[in-house]
Amino acid sequence: MPHIMTSDLVSLAYTTALLVVVAGIVVTLYRFLVQAISAMTLWALLGLILTAGYSYRSELGSFGSWLLAAGGPSHELPHGTTVAVARTNGDFAVTAEINGSRATMILDTGARLIVLTQNDAEAANLPVELLNYTIDIDTANGRTRAAPVTIDRFAIGNVVERSVNALVVRPGQLKISLLGMSFLDRLQHWEVSGDRLSLVPHAAAAPDQHNDFMNFRNTITSFVRAERR
């Protein structure tokens, strides 16, 4: 009888230990399964978000540019090679680079050429001491004369043009330089829509779909590798 009781106890202990091991394995597998499902759900959701963002990247970029343009005065907002400018106090005030020198200008579609103040012309290293004021123009201060010049490099944001015709007025005849048609006519497209001015140069390249896809794929791969680590 004692022998039988001892065997029963050994068998019971073995069975109990086996059950504990099996229960541990089941619990571990359950936790792993729950984590795996959670991770799969998270990655699926992330993939959907990234895919949607990639599919509607143009619309999102345009909305972001519009939002930024509407949110503050005189902001140039590069988007690829397109620039959006917000209206300020009724005017489109832009910051241009004239031969590397920064100057604030007002859009004036009635001006046939870019018109520079004497100070902006000097800052752009134009030969103001050699200018010949032979062209009659009308300004806010009345009729005056201006001198023709050629700007080597004229840029607004990412929009860059070379050898742009312009005029320089006599000192004191203009408070701020004017952005005229000699620049706008160089562009592939420009338009005023509400409080937003859009400038699109001829050099604007179409989006590289292949590179966009590769960047998207590399982003997903990086996330996956980081999660595995």
Image (cartoon, helix red, strand yellow):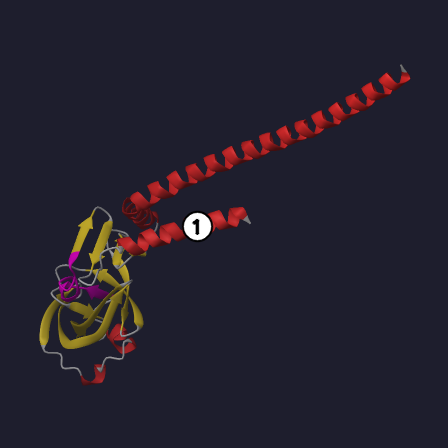
The location of residue 92, given as percent across then percent down, is 24, 56
Outermost residue, right direction? 2
Q: Is residue 155 left or right of residue 134?
A: right
> At label 1, which amino acid type do we have?
Thr
Bin the neighbour count of mark 1 within 10 Å (Cα to Cα): few under 14, some 14-19, many 20 and up.
Answer: few
Outermost residue, top direction? 1
* Near-viewer residue (17 or 23): 17
Q: Confirm whether residue 52 shows in the render.
A: yes
Residue at x 46%, y 52% (from the top left corner): 222
Q: Is residue 183 magenta?
A: yes
Q: Is residue 211 magenta?
A: no
The location of residue 198, given as percent across then percent down, is 22, 54
* Near-viewer residue (225 or 56): 225
Count of numbered badges drawn on the protein: 1
Q: Confirm whether residue 74 shows in the render.
A: no
Residue at x 24%, y 50% (from the top left corner): 196
Quarter of the N terminus within the rendering: top right
From what the image shows, is residue 65 above or below residue 41?
Answer: below
Q: Is residue 106 left or right of residue 217?
A: left
Quadrant of residue 27 in the image?
Answer: top right
Residue at x 32%, y 53% (from the top left corner): 212
Q: Is residue 32 left or right of residue 126?
A: right
The location of residue 68, given as percent across then percent down, is 34, 49
* Chain part drawn in magenta: 176-189
The location of residue 225, given as percent across then percent down, is 49, 50
Q: Tag 1, which secondary structure? A: helix
* Near-viewer residue (143 or 93): 93
Residue at x 37%, y 50% (from the top left corner): 216
* Near-viewer residue (189 or 136): 189
Quadrant of residue 158 in the image?
Answer: bottom left
Label 1 sits on residue? 221
